[in-house]
Amino acid sequence: MTQTPQTTSIYWSDGDSGRLNGVKFRLANIDAPETGSLKQRGGAKCEAERKLGYDAKAFLVEFTRGKEIKIVRDYGKDRYDRLVVELSADGFDVARAALDAGHIKPWPFKNGRAQALKPDWCRP
């Protein structure tokens, strides 16, 4: 298990991943809409998803701004070499806040395997 010190600085790449103290991370057991170009591999599948992705990122930037960020649980690294984590911001669960606000959706994993289909952000 990798230990990352508490910090007040976090960079969000999108609504479920970014960098904490220079360490790439991904929030555990959730999915956020993609912000990448429709032409980009791994990017958004429709323009609506892309807009939702930017909204999710903006929510998390504001939710974590100026707060003490702590890794609550570390699941190890994923296939993209990102640390899969649960985070808190001033003691509040970051993923739960984004879920409650409707910006991300559950996408449970167990032993590195998805337990459900990846959410489809292009369906109304």
Image (tube, helix red, strand yellow):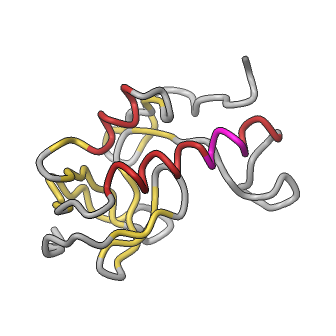
Does 87 lie within the magenta span? no
The image position of residue 88, as x and y in percent, is 19, 50
Q: Quadrant of the N terminus?
A: bottom left
Q: How many marks?
A: 0
Q: Is residue 26 positioned above or below 99 on the image?
A: below
Q: Quadrant of residue 113?
A: top left
Position above or below: 45 against 42: above
* Left or right, 117 with reference to 107: right
- The spot of residue 31 in percent (x, y) is 50, 40
Q: Is residue 41 above or below residue 47?
A: below
The quadrant the C terminus occupies is top right
Q: Quarter of the image holding residue 74? A: bottom left
What span is colored magenta in the figure? 50-54
**Residue at the image point whose x is 48% and y is 35% from the top:** 104
Residue 8's place in the image compared with 47, above or below, is below
* Image x and y of residue 60, in percent: 42, 50
- Residue placed furthest toward the top: 124
Which image quadrant for residue 37?
bottom right
Residue drawn 11% across the image and 47% down it: 91
Question: Predominant secondary structure in magenta?
Answer: helix
Residue at image location 24% in from the left, 52% down from the top: 87
Instruction: Check residue 52 for magenta coloring.
Output: yes
Pick out the residue farthest to the right. 39
Closer to the camera in the image, 73 or 87: 87
On screen, residue 98 versus residue 75, left or right, reads right
Front residue of this view, candidates 81 and 93: 93
Q: Residue at x 59, y 43 (%)?
A: 55
